[in-house]
Structure formats: structure tokens, C-alpha cells
Amino acid sequence: MAPVVAPKNPGLSLIASFFIPGLGTMINGEVGKGIAFLLIYLISWPLTLVFVGVPLMLGVWIWGMVDAYTGAQNWNRRYGIWS
């Protein structure tokens, strides 16, 4: 008998990461990776004073959203759930 798992919602993960970088990844169960996204994003804020943090902040924000969305899709596929 196959284990019953609840599907992950890629849209919810994307929206969560839009507002708080790394949150969608944490929702998907990859807590360490999500915390890393959040910490890098928070570190980049003070670096915006010297303009180094702006590309870093935007890059981590976008990367976090993409990772959250694809992570949820990959999790669903791993368990045979096509969303």
C-alpha cells in the first residue's frame, strides 16, 4: 500500500516567497534551504547602502520564488501527483 501524502501547492509557495523570501521553500519542507534564502536576503539589506546589496537582494528574492514553485512541483511529481 502506497503512503498517502498531501500535495504541495506551487502557487501558495510562490506567493509566500513573494512576501517573505524563503518561506515558500520552508512550506515545501526544505527548512534549511529556506532559512538560507531568508538570511542572505536579510544580510543584503544593509549592503544596499553601498549598492552591492541591490542585485544580491533582487537575485535572492527571485531565486527564492522560482525555487519554491519548482520545489513544490518536484515534490508532487515525486509522489505521483500531477499539478
Image (spheres, rainbow, N blue to C red):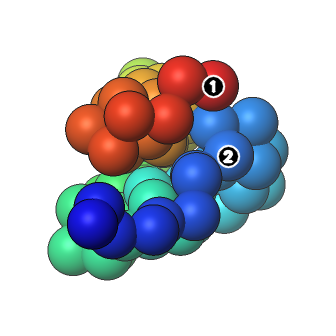
Q: Residue at x 29, y 61 (%)?
A: 2
Quadrant housing the C terminus: top right
Give me the disc on residue 15: none
Against 7, is 66 above or below?
above
Give me the disc on residue 83: 1
The kind of residue on which mark 2 rests is Asn
Quadrant housing the N terminus: bottom left
Left or right: 6 as drawn, with respect to 3: right
Q: Residue at x 66, y 61 (%)?
A: 20
Q: Residue at x 50, y 35 (%)?
A: 81
Q: Are marks 2 and 1 in contact (CB under 8 Å)?
A: yes
For label 1, count other residues whose C-alpha is less than 10 Å away and answer few (under 14), some (14-19) or many (20+).
few
- Depth order, front residue of 16/75: 75
The kind of residue on which mark 1 rests is Ser
- Depth order, front residue of 32/55: 32
Location of residue 55 in the rendering, given as x and y in whole percent from the top left corner:
42, 24
- Depth order, front residue of 80/15: 80
Against 20, is 82 above or below?
above
Q: Quadrant of residue 43?
A: bottom left
Against 71, is 31 above or below?
below
Q: Residue at x 75, y 36 (%)?
A: 11
- If you read the primary sequence from the N terminus, does the residue marked by circle 2 or circle 1 appear first? 2
Query: Does the rendering let one see residue 57?
Result: no
Find numbered disc 1 in the image and state the secondary structure of the residue it sits on. Answer: loop
Query: Does the rendering let one see residue 32?
Result: yes
Mark 2 to mark 1: distance in Å?
8 Å
Q: Which residue is mark 2?
A: 9
Q: Nearer the viewer, mark 2 or mark 1?
A: 1
Left or right: 7 as drawn, with respect to 44: right
